[in-house]
Image (cartoon, rainbow, N blue to C red):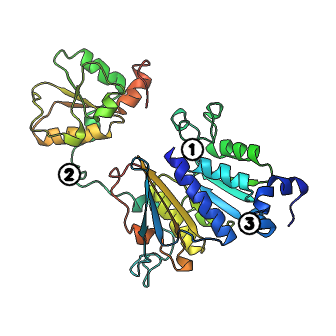
Amino acid sequence: MLPGVVGLIQATEIIKLILEGGAPLIGRLLLYDAMKMNFKEVRVRKDPECALCGVHPSVTELIDYKAFCDVPLPGAELSEDIDEAEFELSPREFKDAMDQDPSAVLVDVRETYEWDICRIDGAQLMPLSSFDPTTTGLDPETTIYLYCYKGKRSMLALKELKRAGFNKLKNLSGGIDLWAEEVDSDMPQY
Amino acid sequence: MKLNNEEINRYSRHLTLPEVGMAGQLEIKKSRVLMIGAGGLGSPLGMYLGAVGVGKIGLVDFDVVDHTNLHRQIAHTTADEGRPKVESLRDTILAGNPHVEIIEHSGYFNAHNCLAIVKDYDLILDGSDNFPTRFCANDAAFFLKKPLIHGAIFQFEGQVTVFAPHLGGPCYRCLLPEPPPEGAVPT
């Protein structure tokens, strides 16, 4: 319902601008909190230093917006020397490898609310938000099979484990989402 | 430009409001509004702007209707699953008001096409869900001196403002000079 509230405020502003009536939200940022059910207004001033509309603009034509917004998370660039492909398994390969590995340990690094939606049988939950590779209690001698929703977060956890001295690691490529498509058709997708 | 009898009847509750009136309703009919995004924000935006009689509405979206969209993107119905969102939203708007001209811009909105699209509209609505599109919409609106009506939502909070640097107000980059790290803020 939130998009309805926000979209209709935008629509209202459009009609006011067309009719040149009322006080438009120029220079005012309206914030809506559905849980607290309140509106707040913050003044936004034109920044003389703005790269686009400031006094001495540095952006004078369109740029590559994808590249501009491709800002890595702090820490994400660490250990880029790791060849990710070496650890990736397709859902089918991941399942086959675990089936043939009696000591396989399966770790789900998604958050609790995702775990509550669906999970792979036998997994233990270690959310990435509180993941500490030094206190997992995992055995570096057994192979650790990691998964998340799409395979990105579990690769971050894998890299942290690698740095902490673990070497026998596998990542579910495409995450539980692709697993639901290729291995377990009863698994819901979200 | 004139309203025909059916339109006069349709908009009669506007025509009797002094703040709108016949002159205002004709301004609404003359206006050309570009909507970037035909999803959660675009659904109510398109439905209302169409119903109130905006003359020309441009729709930009590259995506198709997915099952997980239906609970919040109310212009799209279960039967629309798999259809391009611009087509689904177009049909919903026209079902509500056949007097609207809908222009479909099916595809991505980016540096290669944004100026060519934006130049034909008076007002730009940002109902996108990602930072590259928001910055691109901001810069295109700035270069072509069009007001940009910004809306964004995250979890249980939303924000709306109007960027119009050519009218003395700030732009999106005044509010957010640099994009946040990828993944730090879910869109």
- Return the residue nearer the eye: A76 or B61: B61
Q: Which residue is mark 1?
A: B63
Above or below residue A138? Residue A34 is below
Quadrant in which the C terminus of chain A is drawn = top left
Which secondary structure, mark 1?
A: loop
Q: Which residue is mark 2?
A: A78
Instruction: Tell me the amino acid under the disc marked 1.
Output: Asp
Residue A63: percent from the left, percent from the top?
A: 47, 67
Q: Which residue is mark 3?
A: B20
Mark 3 Cα-neighbour bin, 10 Å: few <14, some 14–19, many ≥20? some
* Left or right of A142 on screen, residue A49: right
Chain letter of the residue carrying label 2? A
Residue A150: percent from the left, percent from the top?
A: 36, 36
Above or below residue B77? Residue A42 is below
Decide: marks 3, 1 in contact (CB < 8 A)?
Answer: no
Chain letter of the residue carrying label 1? B
Look at 25% across and 51% down and name the residue there. Answer: A76
Residue B144: percent from the left, percent from the top?
A: 60, 73
Distance, label 3 to label 1, CA atoms, is 36 Å
Instruction: Tell me the amino acid under the disc marked 2.
Output: Leu
Mark 2 Cα-neighbour bin, 10 Å: few <14, some 14–19, many ≥20? few
Depth check, mark 1 against mark 2: the one in front is 1
Distance, label 1 to label 2, CA atoms, is 34 Å
Where, by quadrant of the figure, is residue A16 drawn?
Answer: bottom right
Instruction: Tell me the amino acid under the disc marked 3.
Output: Val
Which secondary structure, mark 2?
A: loop
Look at 58% across and 54% down and name the residue there. Answer: A8
